[in-house]
Amino acid sequence: MLQLKSNAPEIKWIIHNADRNDFARSLNNRLLATGTLTDPMIAAVARIVSQNASAATVDAAGVERIVTAFTNAQESGLKYPKMFLADFTFALAMSGRSAGSIWVTEGFKRGGRYLGKVADGKFIASDACTAAERTKVLDVCADPKQAAEAFGKETGRCACCGRELTDPESIANSIGPICAGRYGF
């Protein structure tokens, strides 16, 4: 049975996630009702805590620029901000438990493999995200303007709206002027 002091990280996880995670909510309800958890329950939470600790995370400064870009886009009136950077699509989650976080998927087409999300000042990688992809996502998060310009140079398309760059100034800047303004570039 649960020893509160020896399992503090697990208890913190349960309490912190009880309002947004069904598993954490059920464990929290059991704790409130009985004051105990079984060993398999504790082991399951310990695995989650361990996975979260080993997930690719950075401090707030590391993802602050991509969060700021998405905040700027929303404040400029863009309803569904999205960016195509490196080999990934970054899109603002608009509903559900992840609302407000930035989802990261592989490729540029709908239905790409989910790699994780930017939330709470860090990148939280999914199990499907490789170490190389984590590193690349974090690099993009640290400097989305540079990644947007690189995307524009490589593809001839705006990294924010996906349109072809045709104006000489847009081609030179590798991003459209309207999108650059919306995202604060």
Image (cartoon, rainbow, N blue to C red):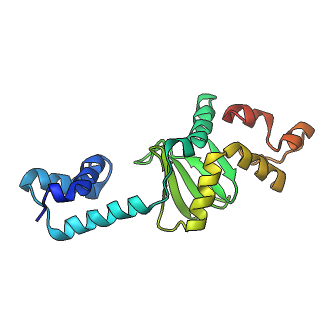
Relative to 83, 13 lies left or right: left
Asked whether residue 107 is in view, the answer is yes
Relative to 136, 116 lies left or right: left
**Where residue 55 sits: x, y (%)?**
45, 60
Image point (89%, 37%), residue name: 169
Image point (62%, 47%), residue name: 142
**Where residue 117 sits: x, y (%)?**
50, 53
Relative vertical location of residue 171 with respect to residue 34 in this rendering, above or below: above
Q: Quadrant of the C terminus?
A: top right
Q: Nearer the viewer, residue 93 or 8?
A: 8
**Where residue 96 sits: x, y (%)?**
42, 47
Image point (51%, 68%), residue name: 128
Relative to 184, 29 lies left or right: left
**Where residue 14 sits: x, y (%)?**
25, 53
Relative vertical location of residue 36 with respect to residue 100 in this rendering, above or below: below
Relative to 117, 97 lies left or right: left
Point out the residue furthest to the front here. 6
Q: Quadrant of the N terminus?
A: bottom left
Image point (59%, 54%), residue name: 138
